């Protein structure tokens, strides 16, 4: 599993969609953060392509960011 493979690193997952305007606007900022914070793993999940995963994490709106550490959810915004 992706989260287990991250070990003790912080994982930031952005739940997004191709049609989402706010997702498109925030994407450059998230990319810049991924370059700046090399010790953090950034991932992107398209809710339309991964509906089951979006349901598992109770995603109701996009963009939604969830932070994980050692497979546990720290924050969901």
Image (tube, grey):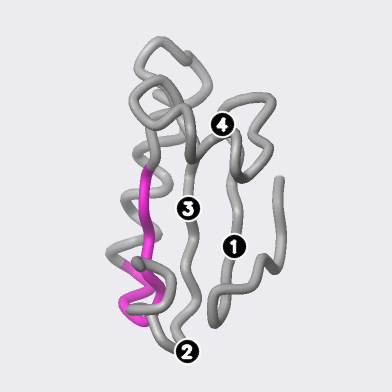
Badge 1 marks a residue whose secondary structure is: strand
Which numbered circle lies on residue 67? 1
Q: Which residue is at 60% across, 53% downward?
A: 66
Q: Which residue is label 4 attached to?
A: 63
Q: CA distance from mark 2 to mark 1?
A: 12 Å
Disc on the earlier residue, 3 or 2 = 2
- Image location (x, y in percent) of residue 41: 37, 69
* Residue 62 occupies quadrant: top right
Q: Is residue 37 above or below residue 51?
A: below
Disc on the earlier residue, 4 or 3 = 3
Q: Is residue 5 above or below residue 3?
A: below
Which numbered circle lies on residue 40? none
Q: CA distance from mark 3 to mark 2?
A: 15 Å
Badge 4 marks a residue whose secondary structure is: loop
Magenta highlight range:
36-44
Q: Is residue 64 left or right of residue 52?
A: right
Q: Is residue 57 above or below residue 48?
A: below
Badge 3 marks a residue whose secondary structure is: strand
Q: Which residue is at 31% across, 77% downward?
A: 38
Quick one: 30 or 76, which is closer to the camera? 76
Q: Are marks 1 and 3 in contact (CB under 8 Å)?
A: yes
What crowding class fits label 4: few (fewer than 14 Cα within 10 Å), some (14-19), or many (20 or more)?
Answer: many
Q: Which residue is label 3 attached to?
A: 13
Badge 2 marks a residue whose secondary structure is: loop
Is residue 25 visible in the rendered structure shown here? no
- Image location (x, y in percent) of residue 44: 37, 44
Disc on the earlier residue, 1 or 3 = 3
Q: Are marks 4 and 2 in contact (CB under 8 Å)?
A: no
- Residue 37: within the magenta? yes
């Amino acid at each position: 599993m992706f989260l287990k493979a991250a070990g003790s690193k912080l994982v930031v997952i952005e739940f997004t969609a191709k049609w989402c305007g706010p997702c498109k606007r925030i994407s450059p900022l998230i990319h810049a953060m991924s370059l700046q914070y090399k010790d953090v793993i950034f991932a992107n999940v398209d809710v339309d392509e991964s509906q089951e995963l979006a349901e598992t994490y109770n995603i109701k709106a996009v963009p939604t960011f969830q932070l994980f550490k050692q497979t546990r959810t720290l924050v969901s915004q």
